[in-house]
Image (cartoon, grey):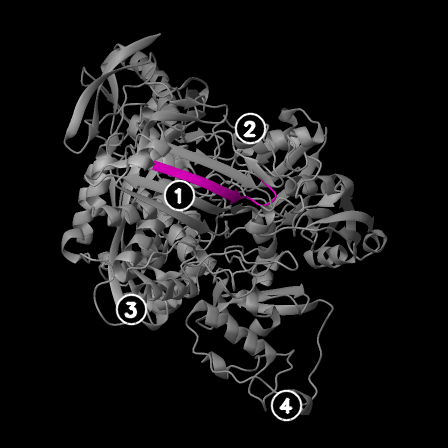
């Protein structure tokens, strides 16, 4: 689970194994909280623990080579360590399906799957995503064949302007991966961190019900 | 040339025949009896695939080669004089390629633009923006309505006539008065401007006389806060200059033609030398009308740097300067007779669009009830806050909240059932409203499930049911054009300049064309939002389907004539004996046929192009203005709400909304349902959660983010039961009307009336936050004890 995932798989890192938490994993936890599926169990490191922690290798501020696995492909790009995963995807890999909307982990627009967990990519530094499988909305379809969830979004018109749609899809995909037949309230919980300004929520619920082989009319009570 | 046709109009089984005179080369209008194959069907959105795969490119997603990033420097002060600006340090920062200073001596709201900088990366531009030193002389300011209305309040726009003066005040550059008609030659009193006339109606009858003779009179003040648009895609623009002094701009402008003119005028260029376009818009809801100053700033920076520049608002910028729904304080008076007749409706509204105009809320007061005596007065009050602009049904959710709650208060005094009262008083101009009220009452269980007496019951959780009316107008733009091109390979493309912010604009155009040509909607490609395309207006006023589907159909009809002429020559039969059948097959009365693609190969030069134009409504407009026309008919809707109230903690839960809505011909039930639900949800968000909170001491917004500015989310969703009613008017060749705005008008009033039914307490101030509910319940309990 995420909360145990407190060190990054490859350098650079300044994790503190003693405290079991890093600033970045806290950031991640906060971000996934916004994505609605987190079971975040966090204790903040004390100043004392920070001081006692072994000196970490320092990276940045200059750009550095970072290697990602995104949608099954490996990419190496040069970026500053302060760049978030959302910015890295959008600006460095041109994967602009992932949307940056509030930039504070409060809207779910930038939700991607990190080792199959939904996270707010605006709350994660890109360098900490190294060594993990990243899946974005561009990775849902297999060639021309849409993911059944995407098909259901189209059929049930679970989108209007479309700007929240990638984040919605990723939160819903994560839900269905873990829970192939979610109840309506489980669906609402799964997307509770995803904001839609057009007000398309009921059609999103209907699409997820349909994609999981259930009656979309359950939305109507 | 014109010809007469007979059309069947009406709704349900209330159908009649009318004679209309229509332009000569207009296809026979679809009426209530038309049997259609594509129109009226739940066709999936034509751009859905791009949106679910992440391929859709919004302005914020676009990059052009060599692009620089621009950042706007905004003032932190609500009011100040700009003394000096020092850019020397910023100019020397790494990566900086251009600095632009706005000609701004006074700032009037937090977030007002001062300067801008362009650099190689966004981070460098942000660093440089921070290094620009602005020396301000802060001035007195007002950010609350009460203070702004005081006679000795600091003037938000001094120089436009002092208190009591009669000078004309113009909004500062970049602020588009939502209602320019509202503020012409105003007589100013301090910050208060009377609005001379409303777009939505005129005073009628004698309210004072009616009030004197009424059996019951309700007088009540209502307040609604500022709602920001909070489009998920913030305002953004990319600008660059082509050789020959041509300006190219990508921006999420809802009207690319208006934006083209605005920018051309700003730079003193012929309109033809500016090109504005976008591919996708992440919502606008009324804002994204003006490109000033942000797109112009991008163009200034691009000219200085000799490279493209992109500017994007941050979420904070969007809250401060991206437009908003004005706040309103409405003093309402309604009067009626014991026999259930509404005799007087009056409102005095003081609204504030901050440092802008257009805070009227009188529309519902003029338009919902057939009442003989109506008087509505709007005042615009200026404040040192970000300027308001059009927002989904300007003034109407606020006005309907105040009016429809006051009406229920009156029903209570008169001992009238709110549904019966509405049947009696609001169904003359819109008789189908009676159907809507009956349908809705049945679906919510009005008779069986509503508390016969408000607030009866015991225990902490109270349940109640309420109703409210909505109204909108038949808005359209005559002269709007759509071009249809049929190509040799059978492909069909339509071009028009309106944009597609999510209302299904491109889908309904494709449907109208596909119906005419015998094709499927997905065989028609629709290209929008480019200023070189034929003109059609911005989505706004809920008029796009009504405005663009008739010329789309007409253009397809005209292109079809060319195709059939070619086919007739090939088959050696008269053109009149040919028709296009499903699949685009050309069928002659002789029995000969040509497949669609075969026929298309006959087109001379490999393609044919035809232009369609939106005629006036066949019966003519009720109101014709330069920027829109209104047809003779109103759009009516009714909503019912079922709520529970936890009296211990003041929490209101919306259990169910039943919405019954007219939108003319329902073009696409699936997409229409999305839009209807979207309007309801936006209204719930406005009524229950949203509020711009201003710090009175500093004059700044305290919640310019999505953490403390709360939008309705998935967990707050009620069950929404929506019913769309086809109402045919016989006014255009498609007879489409509109939906986006009427969907948002009634919801909050229905909720508040339901809360009264649950608790016996009236909410008169939004948002309906727990503190508001608890305060209201406490007042109820005090009254009960007294």
Residue, disc 1: B332
Furthest residue to the top? B1
Residue B136 position within the rendered picture, expressed as x and y whole percent measured from the top left? 78, 52
The answer to whether dots 3 and 1 both sit on one chain is no
Mark nearest the camera among 4 and 2 is: 4
Element type where label 3 sits in the image: loop
**Mark 2 — residue?**
B532
Q: Using the image, tell me which numbered label, if any, was put on residue A182.
A: 3
Res. B540 visible in picture: no
Q: Identify the subunit bearing mark 4.
A: A
Region of the chain picked out in magenta, as a range: B345-356
Q: Are marks 1 and 4 on the same chain?
A: no
Q: Which mark is residue A49?
A: 4
Q: Residue B100 placed where, x, y %?
A: 76, 44
Residue at 29% x, 35% y is: B213
The first of marks 1 and 2 along the sequence is: 1
Q: Is residue B710 left or right of residue A66?
A: left
Crowding at label 3, few (<14), some or many (≥20) Cα neighbours within 10 Å? some
């Amino acid at each position: 689970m995420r909360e145990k995932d407190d060190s990054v798989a490859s350098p650079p890192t300044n994790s503190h194994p003693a405290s079991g938490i890093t600033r970045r994993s806290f950031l991640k936890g906060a971000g996934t909280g916004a994505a609605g599926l987190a079971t975040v169990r966090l204790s903040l490191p004390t100043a004392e623990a920070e001081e006692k922690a072994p000196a970490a290798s320092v990276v940045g501020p200059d750009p550095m080579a970072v290697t990602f696995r995104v949608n099954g492909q490996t990419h190496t790009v040069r970026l500053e360590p302060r760049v978030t995963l959302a910015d890295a995807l959008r600006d460095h890999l041109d994967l602009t399906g992932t949307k940056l909307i509030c930039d504070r982990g409060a809207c779910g627009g930038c939700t991607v799957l990190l080792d199959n967990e939904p996270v707010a990519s605006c709350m994660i530094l890109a360098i900490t995503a190294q060594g993990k499988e990243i899946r974005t909305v561009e990775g849902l379809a297999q060639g021309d064949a849409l993911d059944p969830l995407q098909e259901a979004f189209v059929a049930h018109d679970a989108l209007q302007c479309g700007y929240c749609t990638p984040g919605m899809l990723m939160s819903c995909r994560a839900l269905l991966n873990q829970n192939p037949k979610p109840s309506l309230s489980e669906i609402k919980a799964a997307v509770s961190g995803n904001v839609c300004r057009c007000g398309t929520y009921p059609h999103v619920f209907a699409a997820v019900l349909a994609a999981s082989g259930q009656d979309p009319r359950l939305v109507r009570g | 040339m014109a010809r007469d046709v007979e059309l069947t109009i009406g709704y349900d089984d209330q159908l009649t025949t009318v004679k209309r005179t229509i332009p000569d080369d207009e296809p026979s209008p679809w009426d209530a009896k038309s049997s259609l194959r594509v129109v009226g069907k739940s066709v999936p959105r034509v751009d859905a695939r791009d949106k679910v795969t992440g391929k859709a490119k919004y302005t914020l997603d676009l990059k052009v080669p060599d692009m620089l990033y621009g950042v706007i420097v905004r003032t932190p002060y609500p009011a100040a004089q700009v003394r000096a600006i020092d850019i020397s340090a910023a100019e020397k920062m790494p990566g900086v390629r251009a600095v632009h200073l706005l000609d701004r001596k006074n700032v009037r709201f937090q977030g007002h633009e001062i300067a801008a900088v362009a650099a190689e990366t966004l981070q460098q531009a942000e660093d440089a923006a921070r290094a620009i030193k602005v020396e301000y002389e802060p001035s007195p300011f007002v950010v609350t309505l009460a203070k702004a209305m005081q006679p000795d309040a600091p003037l938000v726009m001094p120089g436009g006539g002092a208190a009591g003066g009669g000078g004309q005040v113009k909004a500062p550059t970049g602020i588009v008065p939502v209602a320019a008609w509202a503020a012409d030659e105003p007589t100013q009193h301090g910050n208060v401007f009377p609005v001379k006339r409303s777009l939505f109606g005129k005073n009628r009858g004698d309210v004072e006389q009616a009030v004197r003779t009424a059996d019951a009179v309700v007088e009540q003040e209502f307040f609604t806060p500022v709602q920001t648009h909070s489009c998920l895609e913030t305002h953004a623009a990319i600008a660059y200059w082509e050789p020959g002094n041509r300006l190219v701009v990508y921006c999420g402008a809802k009207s690319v033609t208006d934006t083209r003119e605005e920018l051309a005028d700003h730079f003193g260029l012929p309109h033809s030398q500016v090109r504005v376009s976008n591919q996708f818009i992440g919502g606008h809801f009324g804002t994204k009308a003006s490109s000033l100053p942000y797109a112009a700033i991008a163009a200034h920076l691009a000219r200085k740097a000799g490279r493209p520049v992109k500017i994007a608002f941050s979420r904070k910028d969007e809250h401060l300067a991206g437009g908003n729904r004005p706040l309103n304080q409405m003093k309402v008076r309604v009067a009626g007779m014991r026999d259930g007749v509404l005799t007087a409706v009056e409102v005095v509204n003081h609204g504030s669009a901050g440092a802008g105009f257009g805070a009227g809320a009188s529309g519902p007061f003029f338009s919902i009830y057939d009442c003989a005596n109506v008087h509505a007065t709007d005042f615009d009050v200026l404040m040192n806050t970000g300027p308001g602009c059009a927002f989904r049904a300007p003034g109407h959710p606020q006005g309907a909240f105040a009016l429809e709650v006051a009406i229920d208060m009156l029903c209570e005094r008169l001992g009238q059932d709110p549904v019966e009262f509405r049947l009696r008083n609001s169904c003359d101009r819109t008789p189908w409203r009676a159907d809507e009220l009956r349908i809705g009452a049945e679906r919510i269980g009005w008779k069986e499930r509503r508390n016969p007496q408000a607030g009866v019951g015991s225990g902490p959780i109270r349940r109640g049911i309420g109703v409210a009316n909505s109204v909108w107008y038949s808005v359209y733009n005559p002269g709007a054009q759509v071009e249809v091109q049929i190509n040799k390979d059978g492909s069909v493309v339509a071009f028009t300049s309106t944009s597609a912010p999510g209302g299904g604009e491109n889908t309904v155009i494709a449907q109208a064309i596909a119906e005419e040509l015998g094709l499927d909607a997905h065989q028609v490609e629709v290209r929008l939002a480019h200023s070189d395309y034929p003109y059609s207006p911005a989505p706004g006023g809920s008029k796009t389907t009504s405005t663009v589907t008739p010329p789309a159909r007409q253009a397809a009809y005209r292109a079809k004539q060319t195709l059939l002429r070619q086919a007739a020559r090939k088959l050696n039969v008269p053109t009149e004996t040919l028709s296009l059948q499903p699949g685009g097959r050309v069928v002659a009365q002789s029995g000969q046929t040509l497949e669609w693609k075969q026929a298309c190969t006959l087109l001379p030069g490999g393609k044919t192009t035809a232009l369609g134009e939106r005629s006036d409504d066949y019966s003519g407009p009720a109101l014709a203005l330069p920027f829109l026309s209104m047809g003779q008919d109103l759009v009516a809707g009714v909503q019912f709400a079922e709520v529970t109230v936890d009296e211990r903690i003041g929490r209101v839960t919306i259990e169910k909304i039943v919405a019954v809505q007219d939108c003319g011909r329902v073009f696409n039930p699936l997409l229409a349902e999305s839009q209807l639900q979207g309007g309801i949800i936006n209204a719930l968000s406005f009524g229950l959660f949203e509020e711009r909170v201003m710090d009175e001491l500093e004059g700044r917004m305290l919640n310019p983010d999505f953490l403390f500015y709360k939008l309705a989310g998935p967990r707050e969703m009620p069950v929404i039961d929506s019913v769309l009613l086809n109402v045919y008017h016989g006014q255009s060749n498609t007879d489409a009307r509109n939906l986006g705005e009427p969907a948002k008008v009634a919801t909050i009033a229905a909720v508040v009336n339901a809360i009264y039914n649950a608790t016996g307490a009236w909410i008169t101030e939004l948002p309906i936050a727990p503190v508001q509910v608890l305060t209201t319940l406490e007042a109820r309990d005090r009254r009960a004890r007294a």
